[in-house]
Image (cartoon, rainbow, N blue to C red):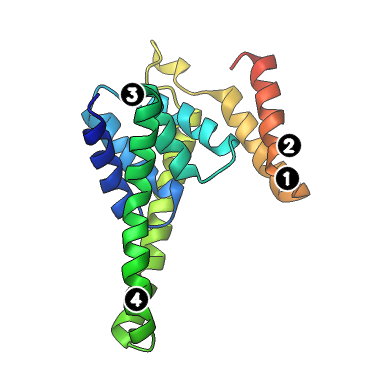
Amino acid sequence: MNLFYLFLTFFRIGFFAIGGGLATLPFLYEIADKSEWLTRESIANMLAMAQSSPGAIGVNLASYTGFRYAGVPGAYAAALGLIFPSIIIIVIVARILSAFKKNRVVQSLFTAFRPAAAGLLSAAGFGAILLSVWNAAAPVWYESFRWKETLLMGIIFVLLFKFKKHPIIYIAAAGAMGFILKL
């Protein structure tokens, strides 16, 4: 894979993924739908890895994707492509914002970015749920629903809100259950 293409792909994602790492998922789904080098199933696996490793989810997703398709140089190209737009935007916004922080247009723009970010994150969350509970590649329709994964997701969701323990506990528990249930 061309490293420059990998950099540009993640540069575009980084430029438009407002809302953080999970907001990159709709862009990754788009790539999966249009290319052979990424699938929705591989995105689900990458998301699980990215969320269970330290660091920013978006950078982890980019690094994992780049590494998978072009080794260590690909990991660097994808990660740099993802973070470079943020650096550019932050420098520009920091310079402009200090001069216009009381401006109504600037305040309106930032107010409008919040629901845009919420929409991107909601779409990413829904996509992650769908990938977890539905297997589109199942040979017959009644095997498409992943009931074990759905049950595990529900249990983790309830436990997380009820007990509010560190997420690594739930990740480790899910990994153990995956091993036990052969998910």
Q: Which residue is mark 2?
A: 169
As measured in the structure, the alpha-carbon distance from the residue carrying label 3 to the one carrying label 4 is: 36 Å
* Percent x, y of residue 88: 31, 60
As measured in the structure, the alpha-carbon distance from the residue carrying label 2 to the one carrying label 4 is: 42 Å
Q: Residues within 10 Å of mark 1 (few under 14, many from 20)?
A: few
Quadrant holding the N terminus = top left
Residue 80 falls left or right of residue 148:
left
Question: In front: mark 3 or mark 2?
Answer: 3
Q: Which residue is mark 3?
A: 70
In primary-sequence order, the first of circles 1 and 4 is 4
Q: Disc 1, disc 2: CB below 8 Å?
A: yes
**In this orientation, which residue lies closer to the viewer: 122 or 110?**
110
The residue tagged with tag 4: helix, strand or loop?
helix
Question: In front: mark 3 or mark 1?
Answer: 3
As measured in the structure, the alpha-carbon distance from the residue carrying label 3 to the one carrying label 1 is: 34 Å
> Compared with residue 126, is residue 17 higher up or lower down, i.e. above or below?
below
In primary-sequence order, the first of circles 3 and 2 is 3
Residue 88 falls left or right of residue 126:
left
Name the quadrant containing residue 73. top left
Q: Disc 3, disc 1: CB below 8 Å?
A: no
**Residue lying at the far top of the rendered structure:** 139
* Percent x, y of residue 180: 70, 15
Residue at point 36%, 58% (across, down):
87
